[in-house]
Image (tube, coloured by chain):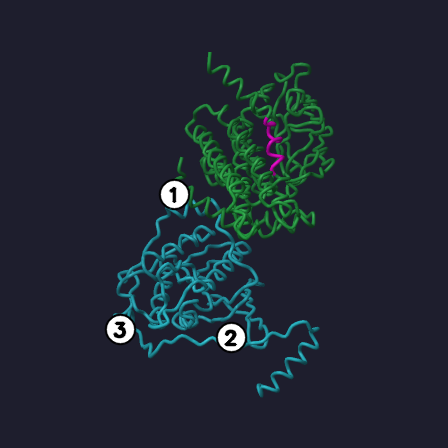
Chain colours: A green, B cyan
Amino acid sequence: MILDEETRDLVQLVRDFVDKEVIPTVGEYEKNDEFPWPLLEKACQMGLNTLCTPVEYGGPGLTNVQTFAIAEEIARGDIGVGTTLIANCLASYPVLIAGTPEQQKLWFETINEKGFAAFCLTEPNAGSDAGSVQTTAVEDGDDFIINGTKSFISNGPIAGIYTVLASTKKAAGVMGLTAFIVERDREGVSIGKEEDKMGMRLSCTSEVIFDNVRIPKDHMLGKKNRGFKYIMETLDHSRAGVGAFGVGIAQRVVEEATKYAKQRRQFGQPVSNFQSVQNMLADMEIKIQCARQMYLHAATLMDEGKSFTMESAIAKTFGTDTGMECAVNGVQVMGGYGYMKDYVMEKLMRDAKILQIYEGTNQIQRGVIASGVIKKYR
Amino acid sequence: MNILVCAKQVPDTTVIKIDPVKHTLIRTGVPSILNTFDTYALETALRLREAEGGTITVISMGPEQAKAILRESLSVGADEVYLISDRAFGGSDTLATSLILSTAIELLEKKNGRKFDLVLCGKQAIDGDTGQVGPEIAQHLDRSIVTYAVQAQMQDGQLRVKRESDEGYDWFSAELPAVVTMNKTSYDMRWPSIKGRKQSRTAEIPVLTAQDVIVPEDRRGLKGSPTKVKKTYTPVHEKNGMKIEGLAAQDAAKKLVELMSAAKLI
């Protein structure tokens, strides 16, 4: 598909922002191990943290195509900044899918006020196997009391509000899980270990601990014991956006690699004259263009209200595999310089890896795709 | 606090070239932008509104395509914008322009039933560089003015303005309503929001014509403009400057004074 004029205009705005504000500054933040607050303040002022907020709560009212195309541009600048901003979308989907108007009001007003939200699914013993969540929510009069530890939570330390999946029916597996909204300032909510990551350094990832956290029953999303369904729908939706992140990284890689290959001279000429380098650049461009079309296709299906589970998984898998492959080859094109911290390429390679892992590993995605295939061809 | 910002669309002079033969600006392919000093005025207005509440109205005089800078103003958060556009206004110099703008301001004030507390302008446009329109507006409206401001804030019901001068900075207090022209501030204009950009693309931009903004015929357009341009020329850029490098600040200052004395400059 070709983006319409409005989308191209919004994408260009974000690209300008990324070129002028993100790319020139993130290297220094990363080097100093500093969280990029000044940059995020500017991004939030632009509303890049509220891309998925509905118009009635002050959001921009974007299509999925627009949201994901913008996500690609942010990822082109920095995947950590992108994750921090777009994790708000991930955390918001359960509220959009199953929340009442009152819950949505509470949720989006809190994001407007505090800036960030987080999605609390993963636990030390519940990764790909999301059904083995051990966090519990026990009814007590008009309340639920939540106990448990969530791990690897993007925006854990900075979120003002969380969506949380907890078990409400012991031994019922995925049919005993319920989704909740929990505010950060409730008694018993605390931040545990902050992770020291290989890449995505400008996103903060931590444990979020719920210790006898009392929440009113009106904080339960949708129906009791139906939480797993909402969370799976959420991930179906969000993972096409992760594919867009992969495309964003790959796009940055091909730009940087090409710029370098045209400048770097060996054997009396630019290395971009050599077929072996050209082939790598061409392979990058082939996959980038295809992967971009795939996430846009999944987003179009969403916008048209059609089923998108398999397409979203394909977009995620192909987009993020493309991100990783391009980054590895980007380092190769730059040779020794690609391996050095003086250039951005090594960072892109470290950053790209997370995308094949989070929001459902690419192995899990292939499982999703395969079950679609097996259903499709009887 | 209700603020009016005067804005102008100008060619981006950082990319502009001058025809070496005709001494005119080569305008083809040069992007049009919101005058840089007006961006400081608009950002200052946005900050004042954040602190004090109220509204921001942006006006611009120019052709149809100047709507672009008004859309940009909307996208960063202006509440209302008006384009003042009429063939009869074409060729206006600063005096005629300031009269037309003042008349438009009075028209909007009549419509709103109250005066704007503050009129903010850029100190000058980066194409004409005259710096006259702001002070002339203050004169037409008979309001107090502070020029070359780098900061403006409200304090105890009074406007406090930091003004840049050759010697340093002056702080002024001004009764409202007032006019302030902005120099380069320590902050840049914020980025448009995604929502603002989306909405501003299709926003209806109201146009005020000579039918609305009533100015006598002999005081508008080319006829109403006493300014006569005698000659334009390209300034010669001397490139034989020198840099004092590799010295500590004190030694560098001594060296500079020596060099300037030797050249009989001091």
Residue A5 got which mark?
A: 1
Q: Mark 2 sits on what residue?
A: B239
Check disc 1 and give the amino acid type: Glu
- Residue A16 lies, with reference to residue A107, above or below; the image says below
Proximity of marks 3 and 2: CB atoms separated by less than 8 Å: no
Q: Is residue B184 visible?
A: yes
**Left of B59 or right of it: where is A236?**
right
Return the disc, 3 or 2, that comes first in the chain's sequence.
Answer: 3
Q: Left of B80 or right of it: where is A331?
A: right
Q: Disc 1 on helix, strand or loop?
A: helix
C-alpha gap between disc 1 and disc 3: 42 Å
Mark 2: give few (<14), some (14-19) or many (20+) Cα within 10 Å. Answer: few
Looking at the rendering, which quadrant does residue B51 occupy?
bottom right
Q: Secondary structure at mark 3?
A: loop
Q: Amino acid at mark 3?
A: Lys
State which region is magenta: A352-362
User: A204 or B240: nearer the eye?
Assistant: B240
Q: CA distance from mark 3 to mark 2?
A: 41 Å
Separation of marks 2 and 1 at Cα, in angstroms: 45 Å
Where's residue A375, x and y in %? 49, 14
Circle 1 residues within 10 Å: few <14, some 14–19, many ≥20: few
Same chain, labels 1 and 3: no
Q: Chain of mark 1?
A: A
Between residues A283 and B95, which one lies in front from this camera angle? A283
> Please, which chain is the residue tagged with disc 2 on?
B
Query: Badge 3 is on which residue?
Result: B223
Q: Residues within 10 Å of mark 3 (few under 14, many from 20)?
A: some
Q: Report in which chain the residue with disc 3 lies.
A: B
Label 2, secondary structure: give it: loop
